[in-house]
Image (cartoon, grey):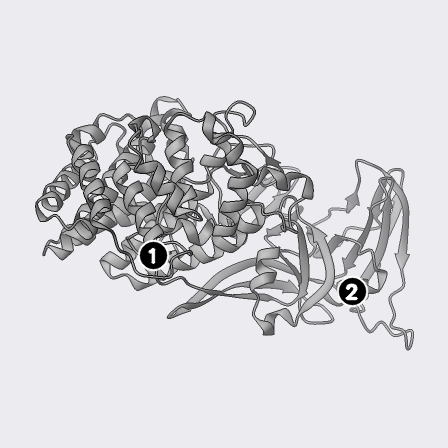
Amino acid sequence: MSISNMKSMSALVQLSASSDDTTNYIEMPLVQGMGFVTSVYHGDLIPEIGSLVGIDSFTQEVVSDSRSTKRSNILSNILKYRVTLYSGSEWLIYVTLPSSSDSFELTISDTSIVGSAAIDGLIIQSVVAPEDSSLETYYDQSAGMYVTGADVKGSVSDDSAEYSFVYSTEGSSESGNPIIFALPHHVQSLTSDCYAAALDIQLPSTTKGNMTAFLTNELVMSETLETSISFLPWSQTMTGSLSYTSEQLNLIVNAANSELNVDIAETVASLDSTYSSGKVIDKYAYILLVVSEIIQDEEATNSTLSALKDAFTPFLENKQYYPFMYDQKFKGVTSTASNDGDTGADYGSGYYNDHHFHYGYYVHAAAVVGYIDKKLGGTWAEDNKDWVNALIRDVANPSEDDTYFPVSRMFDWFQGHSWAAGLFASGDGKNEESTSEDYNFAYAMKMWGNVIGDGSMESRGSLMLSVMSRAMNMYFYYKSDNTVEPSDILPNKVSGIFFENKVTYTTYFGSPDEHPEYVHGIHMLPITPASSLIRIPSYVEEEWDDQISTFIDDVDSGWTGILRLNQALYDASTSYSFFSSDSWTDTYLDNGQSRTWSLAFSAGVMNAS
């Protein structure tokens, strides 16, 4: 088996008896959304189709319309068969002959379906038969044509955006179109013109509900971008502008003075992982935002900005604990932690695990430093643009013209979110454990694009956020009215680890039986101005009432602060009361969270809501 033509939405699998045989082989294009499983036979191979559960019945179908015996819904060189397995499932098989004069048939032989001859260029397509047999006409109309790939295209105008999957095809069909399937979040955002191609055929996906069939070669979705999200606190609950009382400002000042009473550069340099270093440098970037934009303390701004530049210096010079390298095989910027053979070192970053989680913190911190520095007349962002852009290109390169990185390594435009498993094999496919660190990267990319004047990058980040908001509220965050995921997992309120093939209510570092704060909190951190776009207030309230309220009083760790700042997304008043309490202790802070930002965020949202 060999795999070629690997793109962001497709790959071509080739099967042959040996790698040296370039004449006799089967081609199987795998494309996200494909309507048929398609095999193209080359050389002298005789088709044989089997089933692990066994074949109960097998018949050839005569295709005609209701008015005559003319084969109006299917091309004349296509044969149609119906297969019923012992499991009860029913399949349709379409055989497209290179020429209508070719002599060929499929028959049962023992436990397999076997072709009568070897025909070069023979196409065999299979699909689950719809429960309503009248809908088979759409498969008849699209048989003979198959998708081989898809391009993602997009455009933005002000706060409106469209993105599309444009499918490339081979073969011919009666309708002139292939069948493709769309996920629920696609269907919800399809343009009206595109929705007109919808069929009444649905097919269960593995973990994302029912897919809907379309007789078309293009899906076009529209999204509205939230242009008010920027550097400072924001929530969907806000109806007014950001403001603070003098009492709140005094408390924020005291918190900032306390938390800035450290050597920031040394604190960051002392950490032994790309992930932790990123979280901590971004923690101080948020404090810089507060002292510059909210407290407006010029002296503190200058000193904190200088300290953060110093903290970035080892990374810009590639002298951090685990230096980066450019991997020529898989074309990416990776940690060198695994170069001695330890695949799990640095959270697997050397094997592309969690790159969007890790790099999002650096990109946002760089955006803040660049933003404040630029206001003060500096050129830090321009001077270090290539380094930051390399991290973004590693995760979210938008173009095949950039040959140093694959297109969209982490973010899956079809699925509506990123995958985090890197190169590690998994029997249940790729997975994602932290949705919040996923959209944190998109938010960071958006803000960095804003700072360096790259409008396209900023727009891509905004569009990714809108797509994730729609997808994550269907597949990862479970309100009681969710109609996509199975009803028996909705009470969990959150997915846990979301695989391609299963949803597991747990984390890699602890179970909800002992630490329920883990499985909920990992989908919250960090709380940023983008959080409320994804974690919508009504969902956050449901999750709090149904789950978090049942265990929050038992949590006494850095997860406490994460849960409580998340509370500000629907109840900022109670959240602020927690962070401003006289009984406050820094035990409640995760290493990437500051009391300064927590006070500024919760108070700002509370006052403006």
Height in image: 261 above or below 362? above
Q: On the image, which quarter does residue 580 sit in?
A: top left
Instruction: Find disc 1 in the rendering and name its residue.
Output: 608
Relative to the observer, which residue lies in front, 567 or 159? 567
Q: How many marks?
A: 2
Eye-nearest disc, 1 or 2: 1
Residue 140: assigned label: 2
Q: Is residue 109 left or right of residue 258?
A: right
- Give the spatial CA distance, label 1 vs label 2: 58 Å
Q: From where the camera sits, is residue 183 visible?
A: no
Residue that appears at 20% across and 31% down = 319
Circle 2: is it few (<14), some (14-19), or many (20+) Cα within 10 Å?
many
Residue type at numbered disc 2: Asp
Q: Secondary structure at mark 1?
A: helix
Q: Secondary structure at mark 2?
A: helix
Residue 136: percent from left, percent from top: 80, 62
Most distant residue in the bottom direction: 67
Residue type at numbered disc 1: Ala
Relative to the observer, which residue lies in front, 258 or 228? 258
Residue that appears at 54% across and 25% down = 511
Q: Is residue 266 left or right of residue 197?
A: left
**Quadrant where the image shows the C terminus:** bottom left
Residue 333: percent from left, percent from top: 33, 40
Residue that appears at 37% across and 58% down = 401
Residue 230: assigned label: none
